[in-house]
Amino acid sequence: MQGLGPLARLFNNMSYEKQRHIMVESQLRSRGIKDERVLDAMEKVPRHLFVETDLADRAYDDCALPIGEGQTISQPYMVALMTELLELKGDEKVLEIGTGSGYQSAVLSLLAAEVYTVERIHSLAIRAKKLLADLEYKNVHALVSDGTLGLQEHSPYDGIIVTAGAPEIPYQYTEQLKINGRLVIPVGSRYSQVLYRIDKTAQGIKKSISTGCVFVPLIGKAGWDEKEIY
Ligand code: SAM
């Protein structure tokens, strides 16, 4: 954007705004995303700022995109679906595992009271933290650590969202959820997973399947072993 005059800048912004609106209508609403708060948040967050500059024009495409370090920003539909499954009303404390670009954190920040997000790759975490601060998503707290262990110090959470594929569900997540809290997590093999929603109730754990999906691996003590992956 540097070097553009105010009118050209305005045009650029309007054009992304329009692309975002089309994304919401044609990729999300038409595929069954119903939560108006989620649709509204996805209409507001400037996804093109969360990808590399040379991919900005593809930011609203119906796919995941690379963000460096072999990682990805998830497909808009997957972000919307996982967020909708959390059923956020606005007063919740949410934990996200896998900050990546920070895009999912920004969406959550408009839907919950506090968002804690954890990333294992230092360079991604630093970049996302700076961008989230620059864009004034003030209720997002970004940390670097092994998210397979959850984030004990700020638990319990109303919602936990895991944006990398786990071989199985780390017990720490259900332990760190409040009663009536929800966990959304892809679980399966290295190359294909099933998206689960886990409800923690006073009576126990209820597990439901949402859809098939493909995520980069959740690597850490209670996830995939890095040596087996690369
Ligand atoms: N939510 C991200 C976004 O909006 O851009 C997309 C995340 S990307 C699909 C998955 C991320 O999970 C990667 O950045 C990866 O480094 C991270 N990850 C993998 N294992 C992790 C772990 N144990 N703890 C924290 N982050 C992890």
Image (tube, rainbow, N blue to C red):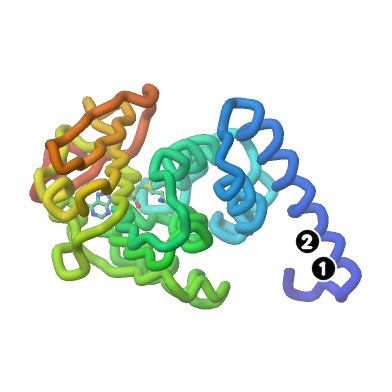
Residue type for callout 2: Asn
Q: Is residue 102 visible?
A: no
Q: Is mark 2 within 8 Å of ligand 1?
A: no
Q: Residue at x 65, y 43 (%)?
A: 60
CA separation in Å, label 1 and label 2: 6 Å
Q: Quadrant of residue 200?
A: top left
Which residue matches tag 2?
13
Front-most of residues 121 and 205 = 205
Which residue matches tag 1?
9
Residue 56 in picture, x, y percent from top left:
65, 53
Q: Is residue 190 above or below residue 70?
A: above
Residue 70 in picture, x, y percent from top left:
37, 46
Which dot marks residue 212?
Answer: none
Quadrant that contains the C terminus: top left
Quadrant that contains the N terminus: bottom right
Q: Quadrant of residue 123?
A: bottom left
Point out the residue furthest to the right here: 7
| Mark 1 residue element | helix
Q: What is the crowding at mark 1: few (fewer than 14 residues within 10 Å), some, or many (at least 20)?
A: some
Q: Residue at x 47, y 76 (%)?
A: 138
Q: Residue at x 55, y 47 (%)?
A: 38
| Mark 2 residue element | helix
Q: Tell me if label 1 and label 2 are in contact, CB under 8 Å.
A: yes
Residue type for callout 1: Arg
Q: Residue at x 19, y 41 (%)?
A: 201
Residue 107 in picture, x, y percent from top left:
51, 55
* Left or right relative to 10: residue 62: left
